[in-house]
Image: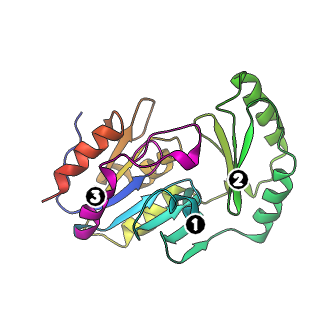
Amino acid sequence: MTPPVADNPLFFLDYDGTLAPIVDDPMQAYPHESVPDLLRALESEYPLWIVTGRFLNDVEQLLEGSYRAIGLHGIQEGTLGGRKENAISDEAKRAIERLRRTVPMGDGIRVESKGPMFAVHYRLSGDKKGAREAIAEWLKELPDVLTPIWGKDVVELRPSGVSKGTAVRRIADSHPDRTPVYLGDDVTDEDAFEALGQDALTIKVGPGDTAARYRLSDAEAVVQYLNHYIG
C-alpha cells in the first residue's frame, strides 16, 4: 500500500538503507544524490530527526547539515556538528570494553568502532553461517546490562532498556499536535515502529517482515515519497 502524506508531520528518518544505500564500507555510505537538498527543504518546514545506529560523529562525515539526531540506537542524542550526549551507564561501559577484547575474529569478521560502542560485521565472511554461530557463542555470557542487536550481517550491543523506540516515543510525546512519520529499513527500526504504533505513519524500506504500516522499496522510492512534502 502506498504511504499517505501526513498533514502535519514529525519526521524520523533512518540513515543507512533509507537515505543512503547499504555498502560494504560504512564510511563510504554517502546519501542518495537528492537527499541533501531534500533534507534542507524538509527541515525548513517541519521538525525532523535523523535516527541511526551509527555514532553521530561518523554520520557527520557523510551528511552535511546541523540536523537533530539520535545515534547508537537511542543511546546518543544531539545535533550533527554540535553537542551530543550519551546515555550509557558505567556498568554498561565496562561490559562493552570487556567484550570488545574478546570478539571471535575470523575470516571476514571485523569490528567497527562506534564511539563508546562497537559493531561486529560478518558481511564479508566466506562462511556467514559459521561466523554468525561463532558470534552467537561469544554472546552466550552476555551480562543482563546489555542486549544484542542483530542486523544485516552485523551484531551490536546496546544497554538494556534503550532503543530507537524509547527515543522517538519520547520526542513524539513532546509534539502531540504532529503525526510521526518514521522511515527505516533495519530490524532495529522495528522498535520504533512498535513504539509509535498505529497513530503514526511507519514505513518499512525494503523487504522483510515488519510492524510498519506501509512499505517503500528503496532509497529512490524514499526520495520520491518525501518530495510530496515539499511545497
Tell me which residue sits at (50%, 46%) in the image: 29
Is disc 1 surrounded by few (<14), some (14 to 19) or many (20+) residues within 10 Å? many
Tell me: residue 100, above or below residue 211.
below
Mark 2 sits on what residue?
A: 118
Q: Are marks 2 and 3 in contact (CB under 8 Å)?
A: no
Quarter of the C terminus within the rendering? bottom left
Q: Which residues are magenta?
A: 15-44
Gap between marks 2 and 3 measured at Cα: 31 Å
In the image, residue 218 sits, relative to residue 45, either above or below, namely: above
Name the residue carrying label 1: 76
Q: Which residue is mark 3?
A: 37
Q: Is residue 114 visible?
A: yes
Q: Badge 3 local density, few (<14 within 10 Å), some, or many (20+)? A: few
Question: Is any atom of residue 213 visible in this view?
Answer: no
In the image, what residue occupies the spot 58% across and 35% down?
A: 152
Give the vertical position of 123 relative to 177 (above or below): above
Residue type marked 1: Gln
Marks 3 and 1 close (CB-CB < 8 Å): no
Looking at the rendered structure, the secondary structure element under dot 1 is strand
Question: If you read the primary sequence from the N terminus, does the residue marked by circle 2 or circle 3 appear first?
Answer: 3
Q: Is residue 93 magenta?
A: no
Which amino acid lies under the numbered mark 2 shown in the image of this protein? Phe
> Is 66 in front, or is 172?
66
Nearer to us in this view, 199 or 53: 53
Q: Quadrant of residue 213?
A: top left
Coordinates of residue 24 in the picture (x, y in percent):
58, 37
Q: Which colour style is shown?
A: rainbow
For this view, does 140 lie left or right of residue 162? right
Q: Determine the secondary structure under disc 2.
A: strand
Q: Secondary structure at mark 3?
A: helix
Nearest the viewer among 24 and 179 is 24
